[in-house]
Image: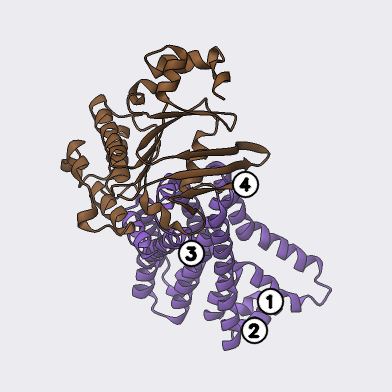
Amino acid sequence: MAEARITYHGVGKRYGKLWALRKVDCAFHAGEVVMLIGPNASGKTTLVKSLLGLASPTEGHITVNGQVIGTDPAYRRSIGYMPQISQFPATLTIGQLLEMMADIRELRADEVEDSLVEELGLSAQLDKRLSTLSGGTKQKVSAVLALRSRPGILVMDEPTAGLDPVSSQRVLQRAAAVRDAGGTVLITSHLMEEVESLADRVAYLEDGNLKFLLPVQEILSSTGSTRLSEALPRMLESNALSHVL
Amino acid sequence: MLKVFKYTLIDLARNRFVLGYALLMLLVAQGLFALEGDPTKALLSLVQVVMALVPLIALVFTVVYMYDTLEFTQLLAVQPMRRSAILGGQLLALAAALLLAQAIGLGLPLLVHSPTVAALVLSLSGSALVLVFAALGALIALKQREKARGVGVALAIWFLFVLVYDALLMWGMFTLSDHPIEPFVVPLAGINPIDLARIMVMLQVDLAAMMGYSGAIYKNFFGSVGGTIVAALILALWVAVPVLFAFRVFRRKDL
């Protein structure tokens, strides 16, 4: 797998009069999982959408593997994306959807990683129409779509929302495997307990500003906590950020 | 683009609304031909139905479909493909599905009961209206963020073209009846694609005479080969302009 690296250079995004993202400078490296956290409307989604090409920055630019992302969509070949809301064409079957996306990505048979289909119990449901699936099953399909092209960059928006604990664990294990293979994984989640064991660094956003991007160990040691879910609230409440900002 | 077209068409082929549209048109057309003894009279009644119903269905269905598939469009937009390919594929599939439904619902009864030039022109005019209003629907859906607002704008546009425009035109012609307004009648008809389509069919059943002096002008102009080409070009513009704007909006849109 090619080394994946993402850099934000002074990226800002304005919707009307509202700045959803303000001059964000940061880099996400190969072989790491970064957890994006922050209150509602803090800019997490906009940060991710800017990378995916769903929103174009008002200022600044983003590079992926050293290339500035612009109108050429080729860079997205290395990206797998699992959105928070999974909505698919109603009358297609799971099998047709998988075929469609492989077709669009021009994946050869040997490039497709389909073991997750079996692991998540979707093999027997390939002929089912997408409109008949539960929210959780749609999330599983979404996870398969994000992971089956063996992406170098994996972006997951609330990946465990709606999934049963076993499936959540399997999806997160796959995310860890992407990291272990040298990929970059960005996860936004409110369920910190579920993803904290996976994270190498944590990015905290507030009002469109990137307040900090720190290794998990540094956050834990600065607060004297053993768990991120305890450390982060403590850190934010006690203003323990001041020494690291 | 062809990949998006192919799978969107597969999805639309089993869409209940599209199937319902084909069935509705089939029932209406069959019903009118069964009720009216004279196929020409049935054809004239069908013209009124087609001119009102086709724009409404093409407009509202396109708007609703585009909103309902927004999340999937986002998923397509993060794939390594250009946005123009996504929108192009979706629009082609929408147009193909609606045209196919119309060919079954309207084309088949016309072929069976009234295989005339007038019926052919009605079929072609109906198809042109599908394309015009699907294009307008796509533009509305891309410009308006909220679905309810988008549907509201679509209904307002349909109302404007079907009722308000004609009412204003009639009021203007009545008020200015003492003035030489005939030179303006042809361009004014061209502004409204529904009126233009209606005139093209009416000329084939020779009802222009019932439209008075304006009818004579219509017949003079649109009845000629040159006039028919102009009418086709105007309808093509009604498709091309909204589609071009839709591509422009979609290319820059934050999804």
Which chain's residue wears label 2?
B
* First in residue order: circle 3 vs circle 2: 3
Find residue A199 and report its image quarter. Answer: top left
- Disc 2/disc 1 C-alpha distance (Å): 8 Å
List x then y, in percent, for residue B212: 68, 77
Which chain's residue wears label 3?
B
Secondary structure category for the residue under label 3? helix
Q: Are marks 2 and 1 in contact (CB under 8 Å)?
A: yes
- Disc 3/disc 2 C-alpha distance (Å): 24 Å
Secondary structure category for the residue under label 4? strand
Q: Which residue is mark 3?
A: B130
Q: Are marks 1 and 4 in contact (CB under 8 Å)?
A: no
With respect to residue B108, does B216 lie above or below? below
Which chain's residue wears label 1?
B
With respect to residue A208, does B198 lie above or below? below
**Can you tell which of label 1 and label 4 is closer to the viewer?**
4
Tell me the amino acid under the disc marked 4.
Glu
Q: Chain B is which colour?
A: purple
- Which residue appears at 52% of the width and 80% of the height? B204
**Can you tell which of label 4 and label 2 is closer to the viewer?**
4
Q: Which residue is mark 1?
A: B186
Q: Which residue is mark 2?
A: B221
* First in residue order: circle 2 vs circle 1: 1
- Which residue appears at 41% of the width and 24% of the height? A216
Q: Residues within 10 Å of mark 4 (few under 14, many from 20)?
A: some
- Which residue appears at 71% of the width and 74% of the height? B185
